[in-house]
Image (cartoon, rainbow, N blue to C red):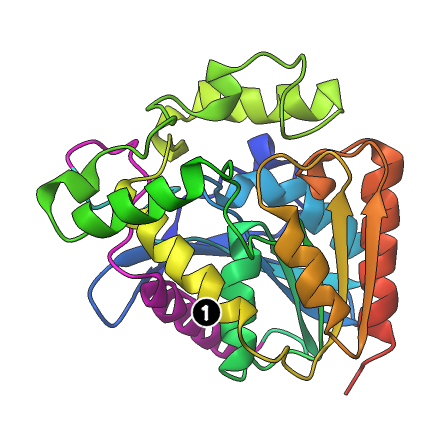
Amino acid sequence: MKQAPLYNDLADGPSGGVAFWLIAPDGVRLRAAYWPGGDNGSVFLFPGRTEYIEKYGRAATALKARGYGTLTIDWRGQGLADRFDSDANLGDVGRFADYQLDVAELTQMAQALDCPRPWYLMAHSMGGCIGLRAMHQGLPVNAVAFSGPMWGISLSPTMRPAAWALSWATHRMPWGQNYAPGTIRETYVLAEPYEDNMLTTDNEMFAYMKRHADAHPEMMLGGPSLRWLYEALRETRALRAMTPPDYAVITILGSNDRVVDVGPIHEVMARWPRSKFEVVRGAEHEIMMEMPAIRKKYFDQAAAIYSAHPV
């Protein structure tokens, strides 16, 4: 592993953080980071689509305060990981299964660094989709905390059949590398004002994300490709059809989440035996970027389920 840049001053992350370049089996270069914590174990933090390591520096600080180290990653196609198109702002992936190669590399990094056990998972949005698939494949964690997991794609009833048809027809053609309808090249926090944004009700947190976009535009990402949309529709449908894996889980959802399809979250959690599900009134999609009281409660709840499952 070769050391990679980590903009810890911008991230507000704990001291001692370090990032590395990882090479997936298919040759894709990834970036992953580790912030040491206390003696309670280590948390794999799976970010969402468009996200990057530094965005979760404050989350790593919150986890360290509760005795946990944090490992996180720039998924392929975003952050400082390799991108696949002439338009670097396009969110693209060959197959959703490719993200599991990234999970495997992050797990190997945790082993190489001898990150303290037990290990746990915290997964947001698209990271919740990747994380659920990894859990079905035996991810070595003891308990899991989801926030706004992407187990369905938010589309209007009239748009859904069209999205399936269009993305299927184009995903293996050159047009598959076009932006999905209704999405744009510019990253969300630069394209939209704070007022009525779909991420957070915390103005300071929105400004935090905007500072990142202004300082490092190379880490930002715009809308998804038609190919990504098709792969996401297929993956979320497949995951919803499966019996939830045998992990202790807590899932937190904002009542005003307009980014993911919330129906599948309710459906999956209703079938999950060892689970707790809570909808936070008035919260938007990004629970870890919400108002301080909401953030604190989420990290406290995650730490509670982690500490209840030390083995």
Mark 1: which secondary structure?
helix
How many numbered discs sit on the rendered protein? 1
Measured as percent of width and height from the top left, residue 262 is found at: 65, 48
- Neighbour tally class for label 1: few under 14, some 14-19, many 20 plus, Cα within 10 Å: few
Measured as percent of width and height from the top left, residue 113 is found at: 52, 73
Q: Nearer the viewer, residue 201 or 28?
A: 201
Residue 208, placed above or below residue 5: above
Q: Residue at x 29, y 52 (%)?
A: 93
Q: Nearer the viewer, residue 168 or 53?
A: 168
Tag 1: residue type?
A: Ala
Measured as percent of width and height from the top left, residue 90 is found at: 29, 35
Residue 72, placed above or below residue 144: above
Residue 113 visible in the snapshot: no
Residue 173, placed above or below residue 155: below
Location of the C terminus (image quadrant): bottom right
Left-right relation of 126 to 224:
right
Which residue extends farthest bottom? 311
Q: Which of the 4 quarters of the picture holds residue 67?
A: bottom right
Left-right relation of 103 to 282:
left
Measured as percent of width and height from the top left, residue 138 is found at: 54, 84
Q: Residue at x 78, y 39 (%)?
A: 255
Q: Residue at x 67, y 12 (%)?
A: 195
Residue 153, placed above or below residue 133: above
Residue 264 visible in the snapshot: yes
Give the residues in magenta.
Answer: 86-114
Is residue 110 covered in magenta? Answer: yes
Residue receiving disc 1: 238
Q: Residue at x 46, y 71 (%)?
A: 109
Location of the N terminus (image quadrant): bottom left
Q: Which of the 4 quarters of the picture holds residue 182?
A: top left
Is residue 80 covered in magenta? Answer: no
